[in-house]
Image (tube, helix red, strand yellow):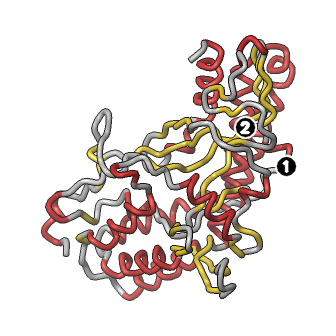
Amino acid sequence: MTDALTTVLARLRDAVRTEADGDPYGDTDVTWREPGPGYRPEDLNALVDDHWEPERARTVATLADGADGADGEGLAAVYADVLRRCLVMRGELTGEERLKLGRYRDLVRGTGTFADPVTGAVRPVPADGPMLRAYRERRAAYLSAELGHNLARAAGGPDWAEHGDRYRDAVKRARDAWICSGYRDELDQVVTYLRGVTERDLVRWRRYLVELCDSARVDTAGGSFHLSSLVPGDLSADSLWHEVRLDGITLRVARAEVSRPWFLPVFLHGRGWALPGDELVCDGGDPPSGRLVRYPTAVLLARDLRLDPALACDATTWGPFTLGVPGLQVIGTVDRRLGRVPDPSPGQLGKLV
């Protein structure tokens, strides 16, 4: 890897690893992808007006699955298997707690439609509810503003000296919008409540999660996948893209958050379940090992790459970049590391069924 490429990737890695990524489930990292094809922005817009576009959904699901575990397993396969085989807490919730659990579930889950690409039959499938959708959109805008701020600060120079306040103000406005109209604090309260209640009784909740996961699975002649989308869906807006400029190198980068309406991280990272025989999904070691040690929370995109000819050396690829392709490229993912999973509370092990 050339010094120039090392510098570019290090700058991008530092710019996208933010405090918001790591809260509340653990550390984050960046995984660079092998060079791939170019996309049009619409190729990655899988969900339009609550209707899933089949081929786009397949593309996004492949990007979002993070299949780097044992036997090429990704998040969807491991999560679905865990839901079916896990032992969970059985307690007794009050009637009020069960009603509140149902209300919170309805706040974050909605319904979309999917048309079978062969038969044309339309069926209902999960989608983010209005509250969670607003949360994701405002969070994505905040993280995009932070990306622009961090890249500009790292570059320094006259632009940062003259416009640093503008970048800081953009981050503040995006954070305020996330808090005021993106339900940031409200959703954090929902997650805290779900974590506490489901660690006392996961029987009904696990049943719901299995149904949710199954309903988001799409079986086609080309294979099966679980519906996922990117936020924002429209990646053509120029405001999403931030410039990276070094000696002999210019490019524009963006990040898009992954939305999985079938996946609740609060369960996977919770302490109210275990697998038979003390089986682990991830051992939480350094380095970690297991069926799944990380999963993507965002994808990193690039476009308009320009290299000094001396750096390209007539190559067709440069690190995670494919040279000369039109459109945008997916160059990596922002990943959440699992830690030890499962990690049940020791005092609750005798209550698992």
Give the x, y percent position of residue 169.
79, 36
Is disc 1 surrounded by few (<14), some (14 to 19) or many (20+) residues within 10 Å? few
The residue wearing badge 2 is: 302
* Amino acid type, label 2: Ala
Q: Residue at x 72, y 23 (%)?
A: 153
The residue wearing badge 1 is: 237
Quadrant in the picture for the N terminus: top right
Which of labels 2 and 1 is toward the front? 2
Residue 113 visible to the viewer:
no
Name the image quarter holding residue 135.
bottom right
Side (left or right) of 27 relative to 117: left
Q: Residue at x 61, y 63 (%)?
A: 58
Residue 197 visible to the viewer:
yes
Q: Say if 147 sits above or below 93 in the image.
A: above
Say which element carries label 1: loop
Side (left or right) of 30 relative to 45: left
Give the x, y percent position of residue 221.
55, 73
Quadrant in the picture for the C terminus: bottom left
Q: How far is disc 2 from disc 1 in space, using C-alphas?
A: 13 Å
Say which element carries label 2: strand
Q: Residue at x 38, y 88 (%)?
A: 95
Give the x, y percent position of residue 78.
37, 61
Side (left or right) of 130 relative to 307: left
* Amino acid type, label 1: Ala
Q: Which sits earlier in the primary sequence, circle 2 or circle 1?
A: 1
Name the image quarter holding residue 148.
top right
Is disc 2 surrounded by few (<14), some (14 to 19) or many (20+) residues within 10 Å? many
Q: Say if 226 sits above or below 168 in the image.
A: below
Q: Residue at x 71, y 56 (%)?
A: 44
Side (left or right) of 96 relative to 106: left
- Front residue of 289/179: it is 289
